[in-house]
Image (cartoon, rainbow, N blue to C red):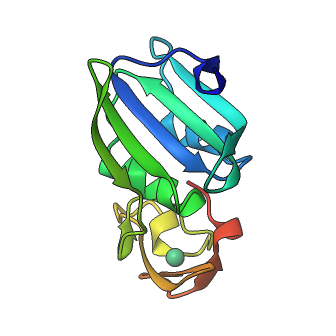
Amino acid sequence: MKELMVKKINNGSVIDHIPVGAGLKVIDILKITPDETAVVLVNVESKKLGRKDIVKIENRELTENEVNKISLIAPNATLNIIENGEVKKKKKVSLPNFLEDVIKCPNSNCITNSNEPVKTKFFFEKKEPVKLRCFYCEKLFDLEEITF
Ligand SMILES: [Zn+2]
């Protein structure tokens, strides 16, 4: 009965293998609207990770932008698309080659923080640990400095 602490969802998305403590950040990224239901399972036992968080959201498929954000905080997460109670698609989250309009530049003098209609763009200088370089101001940032 371990698996059944929370009822299965019939339609929606399950984000599995999230590092412990990052589940609530995932909920934050997904910006749950008042008529949506989501659950976070915190510190669940896992064969692979030891412990993990799981997020389930009903009646929603994630956008590419949301998946890119999640890949930054949960690089080993698995995304399951559920349809009629069955797993229809399962894929591993992976870091994209670059991030467009996904995160904000921490440099307040960057053109992306001015009133210009410029979308942020970052390239990965390194993926482990993550180091991101802003395409516009060319500054390098750690993941901890980044806001979504
Ligand atoms: Zn910048």
State the quadrant of the C terminus.
bottom right
Position of 118 compared to 2: left or right? left
Residue, x 32% and y 44% (percent of image)?
63
Residue, x 62% and y 69% (percent of image)?
106
Q: Quadrant of residue 102?
A: bottom left
Question: From this viewpoint, which residue is outermost toward the top?
Answer: 35
Pinpoint residue 67: horizontal percent, then vertical percent: 40, 51
**How many numbered markers are drawn?**
0
Q: Is residue 57 above or below residue 148?
A: above
Q: In this view, does 18 lie above or below 12?
A: below
Q: Quadrant of residue 93?
A: bottom left
State the quadrant of the N terminus.
top right
Position of 141 compared to 14: left or right? right
112 or 54: nearer the viewer: 54
Q: In this view, does 16 lie above or below 98?
A: above
Pinpoint residue 123: horizontal percent, then vertical percent: 43, 81
Pinpoint residue 140: horizontal percent, then vertical percent: 59, 85
Residue, x 67% and y 38% (percent of image)?
24
Question: From this viewpoint, which residue is outermost toward the front?
Answer: 1
Pinpoint residue 96: horizontal percent, then vertical percent: 37, 70
